[in-house]
Image (cartoon, helix red, strand yellow):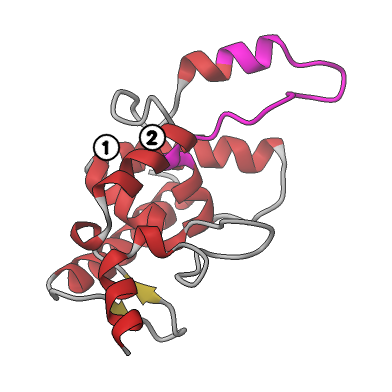
Amino acid sequence: MTALSSQIAWDISIASRRVLAAQRTRRPTRSSNGSIYTPLRTIAPTALAAVIASEDASFCDNDGVDWGALREVLSGAGEHGPSRGVSTITMQTAKNLFLWPGRSTIRKGLEIGMALVLGEVWSKARTLEIYLNIARMGRRTRRDRSRGPALFPQERKSTQSA
C-alpha cells in the first residue's frame, strides 16, 4: 500500500467514525465548525429522489464512477477539454471531503480513485447522507438550510412555530 492510499484509508476511517457518532443520535448534531449534520432519515424522500435525479441518475447502479458517461465526454472533448462534467455523487463527495476545489487532471484522477474506494467501503445511503451534509451548492458555499427548507422539513416546522 502506498503512502497516499494509506492516507486516504486513514481519512476515510476518521470521516466514517464521525458519521457513525452523529448517526447514533436521533436529531441533527452541530459540529465544531458550527455546521449541522443532518441524518439521512430526517431528509424528505422527495428531496433525496430530486438530488439523485439531478446530480447522478446512475447513482444506484454505478460503483462510484459512471464509466460510460466518462468515456462519452472524453471522446467528445474538444480542443479546450470536456464540455461538461461527469462527476457522480460519490466523486463529488470524495472531492468535497478530501480534495481541493480547483480543476485539474491530477485532482480528477485522485477523485476517481477515491470514489472507487468510497463506493466499496460506504453504502449508497451513507454516501448520499454525507454528500447532502457537505455538498457545495454554489461557488465556494456549502449547503445552507435557509436556502433549501424542502430538504429539511422537520427543521422547517420547528422554525415556523418559533
Tag 1: amino acid: Glu
Q: Residue 89 in magenta?
A: yes
Residue 64 in the image: x percent, y percent?
A: 38, 33
Residue at horizontal 66%, vertical 63%? 140
Question: Which of these two is toward me, 83 or 148?
Answer: 148
Query: What mark, if any, has residue 104 been given in the picture?
Result: none
**Left or right of 23 in this view: 48:** right
The magenta region covers: 71-91
Q: How crowded is mark 2: few (under 14 residues within 10 Å), some or many (20 or more)?
A: some
Picture coordinates of residue 162, whole percent (x, y)? 32, 90
Quarter of the rendering occupied by the N terminus: top left
Quick one: which residue is furthest to the front in this view?
A: 161
Q: In this view, does 63 lie to the left or right of 141?
A: left
Q: Residue at x 71, y 11 (%)?
A: 76
Please tell me in which quadrant of the rendered image residue 27 appears: bottom left
Establish if 69 lies above or below 36.
above
Q: Mark 1 and mark 2 in contact? Answer it, CB < 8 Å.
A: yes
Q: Which label number is shown at residue 120? A: 1
Q: Where is residue 7 in the image (x, y as percent from the top left)?
A: 43, 57
Gap in angstroms between the C-alphas marked 1 and 2? 6 Å
Q: Is residue 81 above or below residue 29?
A: above
Residue 146 colored in magenta in the image: no
Give the labeled residue for mark 2.
Answer: 116
Residue furthest out toward the bottom: 162
